[in-house]
Amino acid sequence: MNANQLNRFTNPIPELRANIYYLLEKEGGRKTSVRNGYRGQFHYDGKDWDACQAFIDKEICLLGETVDCYLTTASPHFHIRKLYVGKEFEVREGTRIVGIGIITEILRPDFCLEQ
């Protein structure tokens, strides 16, 4: 994550790691590739949240590819005890789904769902 990306959020430390598949345009996805620092809506449990994506080992994710990334949320207090490894989510632009993700690691322990 670079300094410009970190300045958008109050907590600059990544909270989650995830794999996100970006849909092809013919699958209903975007028309253009996605760049490191993208902030599509992080959608799970029926709600949209803002989360900055910091790609690992690449700057651009082409449509139809899966990217490994860190997520940093803009409102971390809303995610406490709601997430778990393997939880699926969507990346949206408005109501359109442009990506499908899965959490692979929780870096902020208080985000873990109480079981």
Image: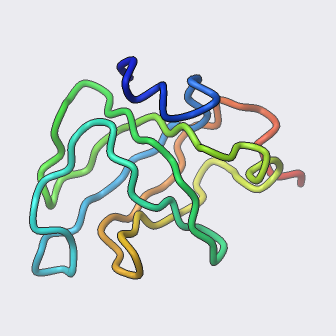
Residue 91 spot, x, y in % from top left = 41, 63
Q: Quadrant of the C terminus?
A: bottom right
- For this view, does 55 lie left or right of residue 52? left
Residue 6 spot, x, y in % from top left = 47, 25
Residue at the image position 60 percent from the left and 59 percent from the top = 87
| Residue 9 or residue 80, whichever sits in front | 9
- For this view, does 75 lie left or right of residue 28? right
| Residue 102 or residue 29, whichever sits in front | 29
| Residue 86 or residue 18, whichever sits in front | 18
Q: Quadrant of residue 61?
A: top left
Position of residue 10 relative to residue 103, above or below, is: above
| Number of marks drawn | 0
Residue at the image position 63 percent from the left and 30 percent from the top = 10
| Residue 6 or residue 57, whichever sits in front | 6
Residue at the image position 55 percent from the left and 29 percent from the top = 14
Residue 4 spot, x, y in % from top left = 37, 24
Residue at the image position 21 percent from the left and 42 percent from the top = 35
Position of residue 73 relative to residue 4, above or below, is: below
Q: How is the image coloured?
A: rainbow
Q: Quadrant of the N terminus?
A: top left
- For this view, does 34 lie left or right of residue 86? left
Position of residue 108 relative to residue 97, above or below, is: above
Q: Quadrant of residue 93?
A: bottom left
Residue 65 spot, x, y in % from top left = 18, 53
